[in-house]
Image (tube, rainbow, N blue to C red):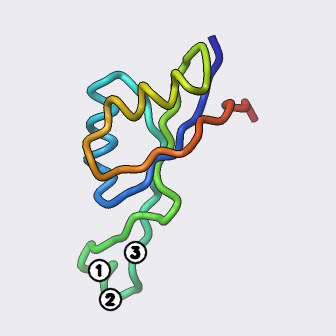
Amino acid sequence: MARFKVRVSGEQLDRARMALDRAGIPTIGPPYYGRGESTESRGESTESERGLLAVLDAKTAEEAEARVRDNLPGGYTEESAEPWEEG
């Protein structure tokens, strides 16, 4: 088996993260950024445009994509799986 990363994008990525977590698929991100000093003090933040990464072991990239797709609620887009490269 190989390890793949699949980028997921859409609104309210916490919902996608929870769904993948329930399926046993670990995720990384998205980072959060405050929207300026005035909103940071009120605790407001916005998700990064980059989305989150699902990281999983699978026999093929297609299998990794299918597992992510099958476990996401509607309204999300998954990109093509790429090999996970240890850095």
Question: Which quadrant would residue 3 be assigned to in this image?
Answer: top right
Tell me if mark 2 has few (under 14), some (14-19) or many (20+) residues whose alpha carbon lies within 10 angstroms of its own: few
Give the residue type that dot 1 points to: Ser
Instruction: Give the distance between the C-alpha atoms of the residues marked 3 and 1, in whole angstroms.
Output: 9 Å
User: Would you place residue 31 above or below residue 25 in this image?
Assistant: below
Amino acid under disc 2: Ser
Name the residue beneath numbered marker 1.
Answer: 41
Q: Which quadrant is home to the C terminus?
A: top right
Q: Are marks 3 and 1 in contact (CB under 8 Å)?
A: no
Note whether 43 is above or below 13 in the view shown.
below
Picture coordinates of residue 34, whole percent (x, y): 40, 74
C-alpha gap between disc 3 and disc 2: 9 Å
In the displayed structure, would residue 1 be above or below residue 11? above
CB-based contact (under 8 Å), mark 2 and mark 1: yes
Q: How many marks?
A: 3
Q: Nearer the viewer, mark 3 or mark 1?
A: 3
Cα separation, mark 2 vs mark 1, equals 6 Å
Looking at the figure, which quarter contains the N terminus?
Answer: top right
Q: Secondary structure at mark 3?
A: strand
Q: Nearer the viewer, residue 72 or 36?
A: 72
Q: Position of residue 32 (x, y in %)?
A: 42, 63
Q: Nearer the viewer, residue 85 or 42?
A: 85
Q: Which residue is mark 3?
A: 34
Q: Disc 2 designates what residue?
A: 38
**In the image, what residue occupies the spot 24% across and 79% down?**
42
Q: Specify which label sits upstream in the sequence, 3 or 1.
A: 3
Which amino acid type is marked by label 3? Gly
Give percent across and percent down for residue 22.
Answer: 26, 27
Q: Residues within 10 Å of mark 1 (few under 14, many from 20)?
A: few
